[in-house]
Image (cartoon, helix red, strand yellow):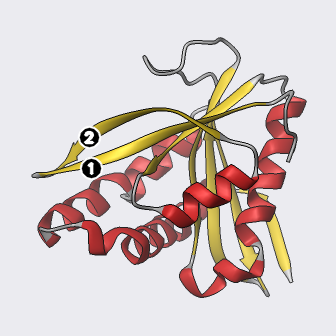
Amino acid sequence: MINIRKADIDDVITISKLGRITFSDTFESFFNDKNDLLDYLEDIFSEKRIHDSILKAESIYWIAFYDSIPVGYAKVKLDFTSQLIIPPNTCYLDKIYVVKKFISKGIGKELHKILMQEIIALKYQRIWLSVLKENQNAINFYHKKGYQIISQYSQNIGSQKFDFFVMALNLDEKAT
């Protein structure tokens, strides 16, 4: 059974572990230099970084459990724009991460449904995200939810360049 709730400060260690596991499972094969991956994991999924992020009013985290086992989480940044996304009332879907062996259980779908309900209730008009161009499973997942590719960019992680799509969804077009 899937249970999802908002995460809080007591979930920092769990989210840190989930982030490291799920990111490694999904993206390790794309890294030529494993030290770049390890450095990235240490930075992005450090307990301090997650702790500080959870305390920010503009960050909302949800944590998913399957039969009481933590198996995934999602994070949205409210009022977050970039040079690629102009409109006001826009939020950023930073992460939906699910442990590999639980991906087929519909947990990502449920996390997305819950976060969409929340941001629609908060009157946001648009949500956007970035996805690695090679991550076809994620691209397909978001296309099914109504997201469209609107731009692309490159970013270095360590010594390696990665290419990303920017996908966006106008919330009056699709609600879940």
Residue under pointer 1: 162
Q: Is residue 33 left or right of residue 51?
A: left
Residue type, label 2: Gln
For the residue labelled by badge 1, is the local secondary structure a helix, a strand or a loop? strand
* Rendering coords of residue 14 (x, y %): 55, 70
| As drawn, 74 above or below 17 | above
Q: Which circle marks residue 102 in the picture? A: none
* Rendering coords of residue 6 (x, y %): 75, 54
Q: Of 89 and 64, which appears nearest the observer?
A: 89
Crowd rating for badge 2 (residues with CA inside 10 Å; few <14, some 14–19, many 20+): few
In this rendering, the count of numbered labels is 2
* Residue 8 seen in the current view: no
For the residue labelled by badge 2, is the local secondary structure a helix, a strand or a loop? strand
Q: Of 73 and 25, which appears nearest the observer?
A: 25
Residue depicted at x 35% and y 53%: 44
Residue depicted at x 60% and y 54%: 9
* Rendering coords of residue 70 (x, y %): 66, 77
Crowd rating for badge 1 (residues with CA inside 10 Å; few <14, some 14–19, many 20+): some
Residue under pointer 2: 155
* Rendering coords of residue 88 (x, y %): 66, 11
Q: Is residue 166 left or right of residue 101?
A: left
Q: Is residue 49 left or right of residue 175?
A: left
> Mark 1 or 2 closer to N-term?
2
Residue type, label 1: Phe
Q: Of 59 and 132, which appears nearest the observer?
A: 132
Compute the Cα span from label 1 to label 2: 5 Å
- Determine contact: label 1, label 2, CB under 8 Å: yes
